[in-house]
Image (cartoon, rainbow, N blue to C red):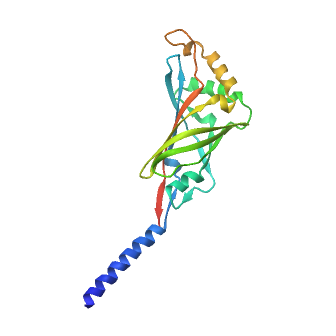
């Protein structure tokens, strides 16, 4: 009988220890495991040009007891001058003519809201550049602790219509497709992939 109670006590201690470990775990944003990619489009046939931003700063509290809570708390700033399309000449024109057409600190500021519950769902991306604000519907998929978010931004809603026209005029010949028409689309696809860290004490 003593052996039975000893085994029972060990079982309970072990399970209580597991519960305590779970209660002491938190998730937090990891800047080293976050990438933001964009795809702009040129030509009438809509050929993609890919790039990314090298500098993304997350501000405020980035820890929560759930990975979903981390996503809700994140407030981010993207330095538009860190744009990187792997073509220095193109990047210089994007910075000067496109983003430079709007006066201000050149930061894209945003956060997520109306995030649906679950591993797969939808949310709203609230984005601001200069004095212009827009709300973008996005889709997300969690795979364990990694989330992928996809959406499409209309740059006109961010006050970048003039910048779009300036950039297209500067690169007129480079934006001509098979039909000879110079075209730079106002829509840009964005994809964010981020892995949150699970820290247990």
Outermost residue to the top: 180
Q: Return the x and y of residue 157 as percentages of the image width and height.
A: 66, 31
Quadrant that contains the N terminus: bottom left
Q: Identify whether 58 is placed above or below 150.
A: below
Front residue of this view, candidates 151 and 129? 151
Front residue of this view, candidates 7 and 167? 7
- The residue located at (52%, 54%) in the rendering is 68
The part of the image, by quadrant, that contains residue 156 is: top right
- The residue located at (47%, 61%) in the rendering is 199
Q: Return the x and y of residue 5 as percentages of the image width and height.
A: 30, 87
Q: How many marks?
A: 0
- The residue located at (64%, 40%) in the rendering is 127
The part of the image, by quadrant, that contains residue 132 is: top right
Q: Identify whether 178 is placed above or below 132.
A: above
Q: Identify whether 36 is placed above or below 66.
A: above
Q: Return the x and y of residue 181 as percentages of the image width and height.
A: 56, 11
- The residue located at (50%, 48%) in the rendering is 32
Front residue of this view, candidates 46 and 99? 46
Q: Return the x and y of residue 110 as percentages of the image width and height.
A: 63, 43
Front residue of this view, candidates 59 and 92? 59
Q: Identify whether 193 is placed above or below 16.
A: above
């Amino acid at each position: 009988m003593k052996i039975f109670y000893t085994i029972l006590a060990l079982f309970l201690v072990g399970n209580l220890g597991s519960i305590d470990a779970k209660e002491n775990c938190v998730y937090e944003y990891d800047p080293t495991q976050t990438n933001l990619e964009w795809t702009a489009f040129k030509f009438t046939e809509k050929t993609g040009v890919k790039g990314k931003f090298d500098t993304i700063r997350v501000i405020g509290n980035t820890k929560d007891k759930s990975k979903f809570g981390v996503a809700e708390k994140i407030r981010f700033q993207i330095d538009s001058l860190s744009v990187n399309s792997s073509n220095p000449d193109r990047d210089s024109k994007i910075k000067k003519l496109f983003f430079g057409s709007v006066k201000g600190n050149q930061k894209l500021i945003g956060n997520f809201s109306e995030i649906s519950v679950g591993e797969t769902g939808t949310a709203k991306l609230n984005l601001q550049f200069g004095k212009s604000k827009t709300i973008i519907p996005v889709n997300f998929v969690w795979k364990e602790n990694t989330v992928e978010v996809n959406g499409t931004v209309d740059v006109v809603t961010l006050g970048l219509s003039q910048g779009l026209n300036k950039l297209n005029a500067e690169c007129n010949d480079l934006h001509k497709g098979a039909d000879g028409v110079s075209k730079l689309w106002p829509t840009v696809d964005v994809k964010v992939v981020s892995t949150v860290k699970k820290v247990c004490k």
